[in-house]
Image: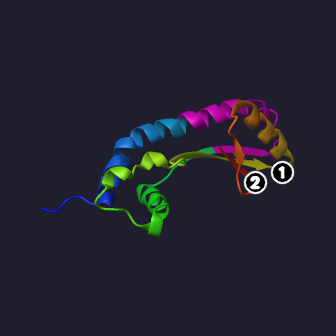
Amino acid sequence: MGERTVEDRLREEYFELLPDIRRVAEELQTEVRHCLLPISGSLDWHERLVVASRIKECESALGALHRRQEGATFDSDRPELYTLTDLNDLAGVRILVFPRSRLTGTDRELRQRFSSWLPGANSRSCRC
């Protein structure tokens, strides 16, 4: 039987981390919803504020880590160099706001609570 590959080791790590990743995603989603209660409680009937968490899939996480490596390859002789904990987006929260006029207030609330808050590339959503 052959030795496990770097990818196999990383897959094992992913599934060991998964319960904690799920917990963090749920906690972050709950914290963001709580932070945005002043806004969500004052929405008009046609306005929307949607908060949803997401977890990066195993193969997507491996691909992201793989792309970060020089030559986009893992050194199979040094598997200890690689860990999925180097990725900063294993769990995330997406916030969708409509209409756009609610975006400024949403951003302000999030910046007060999360000092590292970064708006997402899509002007209708934000990411932290």
What amino acid type is highlighted by mark number 2?
A: Arg
Residue drawn at (43%, 49%) of the image? 84
- The quarter of the rendered structure image containing the C terminus is top right
Secondary structure of the residue carrying numbered label 1: helix
Q: How far apart are marks 1 and 2 (CA)?
A: 7 Å
Q: Residues within 10 Å of mark 2 (few under 14, many from 20)?
A: some
In front of the other: 114 or 100:
114
Which residue in the protein does label 1 denote? 100
Dot 1, how many residues are within 10 Å of its Cα: few (below 14), some (14-19), or many (20+)? few
Which residue is outermost to the right?
A: 101
Q: Which mark is residue 109?
A: none
x then y, percent, for residue 48 = 76, 46
Q: Does the magenta stretch include residue 37?
A: yes
Q: In which quarter of the image is residue 102?
A: top right
The first of marks 1 and 2 along the sequence is 1
Q: In the image, is 13 to the left or to the right of 52?
A: left
Secondary element type, mark 2: loop
Residue 38, image x and y in percent? Answer: 78, 30
Residue 71, above or below 82: below
Residue 83 position (above or below residue 30): below
What is the three-letter code of the residue carrying label 1?
Arg
How is colour applied across the structure in the image? rainbow
Position of residue 108 measured from the top left corner of the image (x, y, whole percent)? 80, 37
Where residue 89 appears, x then y in whole percent?
A: 54, 49
**Which mark, residue 124?**
2
Q: Is 113 positioned to the left or the right of 27 in the image?
A: right
Residue at image position (34%, 43%) is: 16
The reply to whether discs 1 and 2 touch (Cβ–Cβ < 8 Å) is yes
User: What are the residue bounds of the magenta stretch?
Assistant: 27-51
Of residues 77 and 83, the one drawn nearer to the viewer in this rendering: 77
